[in-house]
Image (cartoon, rainbow, N blue to C red):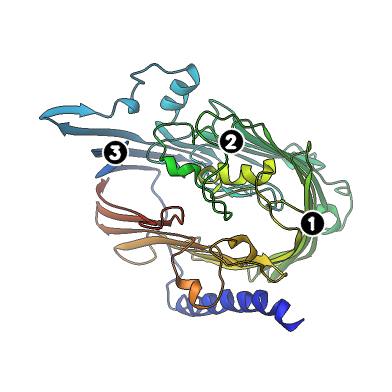
Amino acid sequence: MRDRFARPLAAVALFTMILLPMTAQTEEIPEEVPSADPFGMGMFFGAVTLEGTVYNSIQLMPEFEFGNFAMALNIDFRFTMQDNNFQVYQKDWYFPDGGTFSEYLNLYLTKFEYIRYGTAVDPLYVHLGALPGVNLGTGFIVGGYTNMNLRPERKLFGAELIFDGSLVNFPYLGIDVFTSNVSAWDLFGARLYARPLAFASSSLINRLEVGFSGVWDTDAFVYANESSIDSDYWHMNYGIGYSSFGPGDKAETVQVYGMDIIEPLLSSPAASLALYGDVVVQNPSDPKTGGMVGLGGKLFSFLTYSTQIRMNGEDFQPVYFDRAYDLEKVERYELYSGNASREAGTGYLGSLGFTLLQNGLVFYTSVEGPFSMPTGSAADNPLQYPFLKSSFTLAEGVLPYFDFQFWYEKKGIENWSSLVSPENALIGGLINFRMKSAVITWVTDVKYNPATPDDPWTVSSKIQAGVSF
């Protein structure tokens, strides 16, 4: 029995140890961050590789903010000199081989980086364009989804809408809706929620929330079939090498449905606590079911925490639509369609994070995995081992000259030494050095691909110079 729980307990201890030193480092940072100007203009210079060719890039990003409304443009001018000929990247402006109405609509909409009204905690929130992180309900179906992973080859113009009936004095109903691409609506979802006891006088009981969610992906192979995306997109990481699908194959519509409940237990300035649960069905024609119960909240308004027990049925994938979804659509579909398998079992998730200095300093880390002992190696069966996700952001203005963001995701944590091994890891970082209006940005991504053992590392780095005024 002790061996059965040794790995998850060690994993929870691990991310606690990671968090505590960082928390201690924040105490000496001044509690003030400069407010943003209502208008700003960024101009960035750099280079990017598109379809095997290196292009110089000039990027203009004017930003506007007025009250609850904000908007930013993202105009790229990418060009190269080949055989002494000046050439622009044509797909920034038109499609040489012809394009559909949907393709042209997305092409010109993505000249807007975002159009936003309100914030995610307001009764009305609208966000169009690049979606940095979308959640529905408890996050057990959609948790942290972003449509920005395919950049720079492909930009998507998505949409997210949150409407709470309290805006019109009817707090009993609300709805959240999102799509990754408004020109195609290939991936979209919605959550309709009700507060049946909103009439009660208790501030806890009247916030009881029951939600119903549905998410659909009508073309799971849309990016894999595009020639501009690397052929390694068809790679699988469930111990079977490459996918059983290939270019030209069609996928059935992915369907995921769920019902959730959220009940606040404690609500005060010092601490909050909520009990929540979710029941989810994936692929109704060949049902794969799972559920979750958890507790989570805040301490002292800046420290967030949560813990979950997850009951995963055979081939069930918790948080099907997460941050990495657009990169792993084929991989997820293998389980969804039954071509790959995952044992049923009970698992756990624990998370800790903090937000300080008016979102100037943000840290989040989580560990999830099964309670059962693994039956294979981490290289062949990474899902049988703990999975760590961490991110750390220092926003502009907290320290002079520098701001940065780092992230680390690690599958298949077999032991303590494998925690820092880059195998089955996604590592990235972004550092900005600012001197008055000048900005120098360094960006790097490291990805591990076990399907190419002779050269498993894909490292992408670039340096941009920019001017803000």
Q: What residue type is disc 1 on?
A: Gly
Per the rendering, the mark at residue 220 is 2
> Which residue position holds label 3?
52
* Percent position of residue 246, x then y: 52, 35
Q: Dot 1, how many residues are within 10 Å of its Cα: few (below 14), some (14-19), or many (20+)?
A: many
Q: Secondary structure at mark 3?
A: loop
Q: Which sits earlier in the primary sequence, circle 3 or circle 1?
A: 3
Residue at (35, 21) in percent of width and height? 94
Q: What residue type is disc 3 on?
A: Gly
Q: Secondary structure at mark 2?
A: loop
Q: Nearer the viewer, residue 458 or 454?
A: 454
In the image, residue 113 sits, relative to residue 294, either above or below, namely above
Residue lying farthest to the left in this orientation: 84
What is the CA distance from the residue labelled 2 to the residue labelled 1? 28 Å
What is the CA distance from the residue labelled 2 to the residue labelled 3? 25 Å
What is the CA distance from the residue labelled 3 to the residue labelled 1? 46 Å
Is residue 438 visible to us here?
A: yes
Q: What residue type is disc 2 on?
A: Ala
* Percent position of residue 454, x then y: 36, 57
Per the rendering, the mark at residue 277 is 1
Q: Dot 3, how many residues are within 10 Å of its Cα: few (below 14), some (14-19), or many (20+)?
A: few
Image quarter for residue 63?
top left
Image quarter for residue 427?
bottom left
Per the rendering, the mark at residue 134 is none
Q: Dot 2, how many residues are within 10 Å of its Cα: few (below 14), some (14-19), or many (20+)?
A: many
Q: Which sits earlier in the primary sequence, circle 2 or circle 1?
A: 2
Q: Secondary structure at mark 1?
A: strand
Q: Quadrant of the N terminus?
A: bottom right
Q: Are marks 2 and 3 in contact (CB under 8 Å)?
A: no
In the image, residue 158 sits, relative to residue 135, either above or below, namely above
* Percent position of residue 259, x then y: 80, 46
Q: Which sits earlier in the primary sequence, circle 2 or circle 3?
A: 3
